[in-house]
Amino acid sequence: MKKEMFYVMLGFIFMFFLVLTSTTNATEINVAGGGASFDNVLKPIKEPFEKATGIKLNIIPSGPKVALTDMDRKVRDALLVGLTIDELKDLMKKEAVVLTEGAQLKYTEVGSYDIALLLHKDNTVGQLKKEQIKAIFTGKITNWKEVGGKDMPIIVVWGKLTPGINNNFINSVLDKEKPLQDVLEVATSADVKQSVASNPEAIGLGPLGVVDATVKSQIIPEMRRPFIMVTIGEPKSEVKKLIDFIKNEGKNLIKK
């Protein structure tokens, strides 16, 4: 009897360590993403990707500078950005991002998305022309009545974790003019939408994928953006699977 109990206990111990080992060795990847890539791509594909591949996808909201530094330190596996390659390189120069000597960045385009103006759902203003949008975001137009709306001051909402959207907007819509500094600054595109939905006077920018019934929107044709997966060197096999998933099964899940 004692011998049988011994083998039973031994079996339980073996199973415990087997489960512990499998849990410890579970495959996972750590991917950083800014506002648009976080809301439009990584969040929608997370659960389906994990279910299809058995790979745990850890998503870290982050701007490119921090994410690239973390990748260089090998605590992140990849970065998904809504920037062109040239824009990312310019941003790295501007923010003095320094990587380990010999580190080579690898870029893979995995999709694209539209950018929209976000207004409060009760805003009576119709389609804004580029000149009007430019005047609002540079501070030359400060009241909605100047563009056919109600007599109320305009609040510009600006996302600090959306450099791709911001830089492209400044270049393509503001014609490189300096944007208004007196803004309501928030973090992500989702935060921009929430602030616009909560303030009848507000206007902001965000990927079309964040638009819902709480706001009204207007697509800005000049601002269609790419999604770029960035790694240091060739992406590890799990990241390659993520890239393949986004470009194939996941393309219908991405908010565009």
Image: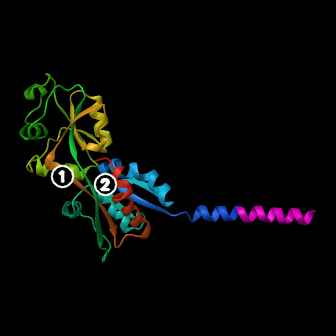
Residue drawn where x is 41% and y is 68% of the image: 74
Residue 101 versus residue 141 in the image, above or below: below
- Residue 89 coordinates in the image, percent (x, y): 21, 64
**Of the pair 157 and 236, the residue shown nearer to us:** 236
User: How many numbered discs?
Assistant: 2
- Dividing the picture into quadrants, the one containing residue 211 is top left
Residue 248 versus residue 194 in the image, above or below: below
Q: Is residue 222 left or right of residue 251?
A: left
- Residue 144 coordinates in the image, percent (x, y): 13, 27
Circle 2 — which element?
A: loop
Q: Which residue is mark 2?
A: 63
Which badge, 2 or 1, is on the more N-terminal residue? 2
How far apart, in angstroms, are the residues tagged by discs 2 and 1? 13 Å
Q: Is residue 191 left or right of residue 125?
A: right
| Predominant secondary structure, magenta span | helix
Residue 84 included in the magenta stretch of the image: no
Which residue is at the far top?
A: 151
Circle number at residue 167? 1
Residue 10 included in the magenta stretch of the image: yes
For badge 1, the amino acid type reads: Asn
Circle 1 — which element?
A: helix
Which residue is at the far bottom?
A: 102
Q: Which contiguous range is marked in magenta?
A: 1-15
Which residue is at the far right?
A: 1
| Residue 55 shows in this picture | no
